[in-house]
Image (spheres, rainbow, N blue to C red):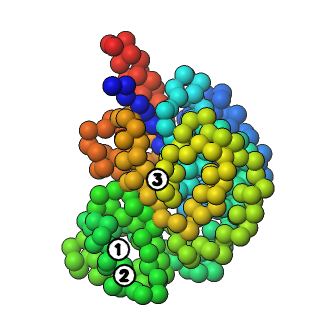
């Protein structure tokens, strides 16, 4: 049986100060991506990635184009070294990186969409203040029941189905605080997320109209590499389907566990996370410990991966 691999791209929350700096300094193809991003952003987003503060990188309108830039810079280096995936997936914002990697969007178009997306989400967060927390220790059914019992006005909803016993709740700030205390009292672990709004929920609806219009006006192409999409965890290649799915991604839950299971069902046994912090690598291991994961966020991790891949190829 032939095994396959997948590139997976993290979203907002995985950013770290200094991200991408050594990749920029070591690979001309990465440098080109950062220069292009600087031009599209209107100021040096590369400087923000390399030397910006953690507080600055938490701003939604900044971190979204910054993360896209870092992920695509690393992806270009891998492709220049002859590393291509069989499948792609990205978590929330990371789905835009997957679309660029597969040729569905140009980097320029994806950057402009993500730049707008970040601004609109930040505005929605100001209009309807909200936040997000990870709840660890509850399964899907249990947490869905807890949310329904807590509120009948959808003041909280499940935003990310990340893995077994790891889900993310999105909602009003006061409701999230109250619900968190209930979960802690029941022995669950609750981890606040550094986000500026209740993402992947109806609280983002005010951001939808302008983003949908921009998506509609952007050229999408059929995927060269199949992508497993967030909102329905299905394999997608058709440009029109990507457009429709991306329109609703912002207010729909991320079905990450199902996305990983879908790729595993297609014989993917190696997951290569492209971007900082190893968040998705850890989630994959929680979903299936038998799978191989690599996390590429720096020159060291990239070169280690290339060396390991070469040694495996030689051994076989």
**How far apart in space, not on screen, are marks 3 and 2 (Cα)?**
24 Å
Tell me: residue 1, above or below residue 180.
above
Could you tell me if the residues under marks 2 and 1 are in contact, i.e. CB atoms within 8 Å?
Answer: yes
| Residue found at x 57% / y 27% | 79
Tell me where residue 82 appears, x and y as whole percent.
54, 22
Viewer-nearest residue: 206 or 121: 206
**How far apart in space, not on screen, are marks 2 and 1 (Cα)?**
6 Å
| Residue found at x 34% / y 56% | 163
| Residue found at x 67% / y 50% | 240
The residue carrying mark 1 is: 144
Helix, strand, or loop for circle 2?
A: helix
The answer to whether residue 16 is seen in the rendering is: no
On screen, residue 114 versus residue 253, left or right, reads right
The residue carrying mark 2 is: 148
Q: Residues within 10 Å of mark 3 (few under 14, many from 20)?
A: many
Helix, strand, or loop for circle 1?
A: helix
On screen, residue 238 versus residue 149, left or right, reads right
Tell me: residue 285, above or below residue 248.
above
Q: What label does residue 233 carry, if any?
A: 3
The answer to whether residue 286 is seen in the rendering is: yes
| Residue found at x 22% / y 77% | 186
Could you tell me if the residues under marks 1 and 3 are in contact, i.e. CB atoms within 8 Å?
Answer: no
Q: Residues within 10 Å of mark 2 (few under 14, many from 20)?
A: some
Tell me where residue 219 appears, x and y as whole percent.
75, 47
Helix, strand, or loop for circle 3?
A: loop
Q: Quadrant of the N terminus?
A: top left
Q: What label does residue 45 carry, if any?
A: none
Q: Quadrant of the C terminus?
A: top left
């Amino acid at each position: 049986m032939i095994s396959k691999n997948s590139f997976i791209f993290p979203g907002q929350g995985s950013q770290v100060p200094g991200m991408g700096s050594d990749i920029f300094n070591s690979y001309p193809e990465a440098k080109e991506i950062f220069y292009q991003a600087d031009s599209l952003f209107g100021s040096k987003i590369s400087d923000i990635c390399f030397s910006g503060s953690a507080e600055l990188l938490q701003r939604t309108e900044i971190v979204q184009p910054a993360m896209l830039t870092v992920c695509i810079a690393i992806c270009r280096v891998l492709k220049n070294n002859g590393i291509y995936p069989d499948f792609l997936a990205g978590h929330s914002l990371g789905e835009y990186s997957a679309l660029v990697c597969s040729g569905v969007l140009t980097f320029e178009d994806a950057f402009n969409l993500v730049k707008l997306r970040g601004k609109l989400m930040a505005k929605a967060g100001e209009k309807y203040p909200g936040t997000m927390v990870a709840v660890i220790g509850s399964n899907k059914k249990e947490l869905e029941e807890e949310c329904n019992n807590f509120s009948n006005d959808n003041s909280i909803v499940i935003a990310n189905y990340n893995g077994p016993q790891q889900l993310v709740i999105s909602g009003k700030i006061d409701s999230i605080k109250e619900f968190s205390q209930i979960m802690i009292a029941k022995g669950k672990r609750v981890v606040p997320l550094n986000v500026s709004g209740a993402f992947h929920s109806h609280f983002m609806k005010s951001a939808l109209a302008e983003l949908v219009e921009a998506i509609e006006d952007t050229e999408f192409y059929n995927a060269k590499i199949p992508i497993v999409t967030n909102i329905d965890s299905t394999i997608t290649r058709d440009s029109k389907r990507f457009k429709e799915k991306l329109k609703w991604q912002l207010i729909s839950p991320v079905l990450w566990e199902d996305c990983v299971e879908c790729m595993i069902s297609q014989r993917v046994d190696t997951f290569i996370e492209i971007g900082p912090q190893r968040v998705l690598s850890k989630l994959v291991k929680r979903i299936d410990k038998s799978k191989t994961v690599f996390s590429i966020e720096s020159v060291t991790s990239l070169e280690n991966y290339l060396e390991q891949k070469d040694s495996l190829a030689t051994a076989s």
